[in-house]
Amino acid sequence: MSYERNFNNTVAIWTAFGGRGSIILPTPTLNWQKKYYSDFGYTQYGSETQIDVHDNGNAQIAVYHAKTPYMSYFDQTTKQWTVVSVSWWSYGAPVILWAGDGVFLAKITGLANIIASFDGITWYNAGYCQGAQNSMTTGAYDTSRGSGVVSWWYYKSPVYYSFDSLMDRTAWTLVGADGTSVPIFSYMTAHQGNFIGIVGGDKSIAIASSATPGSWTTTIPEDLNETHYMYIRSINNKLFVMKYRYVSGVFHVKLCVMNDNATEITETNLSHVGDLADNRIPNPQNIIWMQDWGKYALFMESMLYVSVDGLTWEGVEQPGFTTTNSDTFGGAIYVPGDGFYVKASGYVYYAQY
């Protein structure tokens, strides 16, 4: 069934049925359209068209991957995407390393600086990772402890961390320069007082308390079955990860949920057999928590799946919500009072809700 925007909030539906019983919302079939850099207030820079969308729980931004001194954020007062001047990005294209817990952490492509924001409007030089330059790959931040961590690609695989204010330019501390004590990470998340990451090579998972981010313990080691992991994310206090095996020339992929200390993995009912460059893969990057529904939502090729517990998912078809071959969705957000945004290559899918 089609979803009517004027009848789309929990209170309205509950009231219409007399305010009795449990509130159960239907999964909507949405009207999808493509949005481009100009829809977010940007003027094209060179041939670059890529827009990425991020939500830190309090603010939403649309990041133009180009060396231009602007940032677009969603203005909750005007309900419009609004471009503001951010001089940092005149030095290099912004790349968001972490969005969550009310914090954005970004790097300037080509530099070793960490740039931080709480609202997507004002950005601070939060410090620098000496020698990291262009190779920072991922990061995470725990607001409860004021602790941040960034991993970067280097032959000795170090990690940087900081307890300093995100508004002050201080040197982040390097650990693991011996090449053995701290692994490099391809993906990271913050979860219930810990940093959890997928180790470079994508075959193992490690954890560190956000109180001691220089000390890491492997919780899921490499196995003989050549299991790989990608896209670890903490969403509404649940830890999601994608795992896969390559068997006889074919990828076998499962969406999984991990326990809080990242020692156990439970498979969900969503899986895919085929190419990794396929939007039918259940990718945790495209999971969000919908407070109004009391459910998780996952966006996949022509589908919207929902789940109460993150383990059992049910889907509703989404006509027109599709990409070309080898183009995969790479991040989804919901902007309250506006709608859903899902990143593709060169454009963003949008559905009003």
Image (cartoon, rainbow, N blue to C red):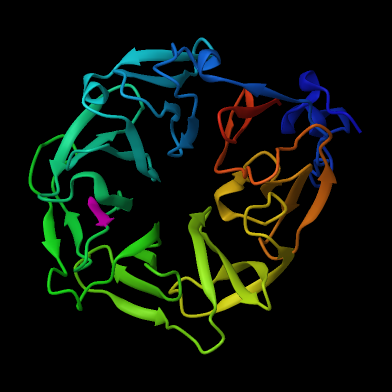
Q: Residue shown at 35%/28% (left/top)? A: 119
Q: Residue shown at 26%/54% (left/top)? A: 150
Q: Quadrant of residue 124?
A: top left
Is 144 rendered above or below residue 176?
above
Q: Is residue 22 magenta?
A: no
Viewer can see residue 21: no
Answer with left or right where residue 193 lies relative to residue 29.
left
Which quarter of the image is occupied by the C terminus? top right
Which quarter of the image is occupied by the N terminus? top right
Q: Nearer the viewer, residue 25 or 105?
A: 105
Answer with left or right where residue 24 lies relative to residue 123.
right
Count of marks placed on residues: 0
Q: Residue furthest bottom?
A: 224
Residue 245 x %, y %? 61, 75
Main SS of the magenta segment?
A: strand
Q: Quadrant of residue 134?
A: top left
Residue 259 x %, y %? 52, 73
Residue 300 x %, y %? 71, 47
Q: Quadrant of residue 71?
A: top left
Viewer can see residue 48: yes
Q: Nearer the viewer, residue 89 or 285?
A: 89
Which residues fall within the magenta stretch?
A: 146-152
Is 182 rendered above or below residue 84?
below
Residue 176 x %, y %? 16, 70
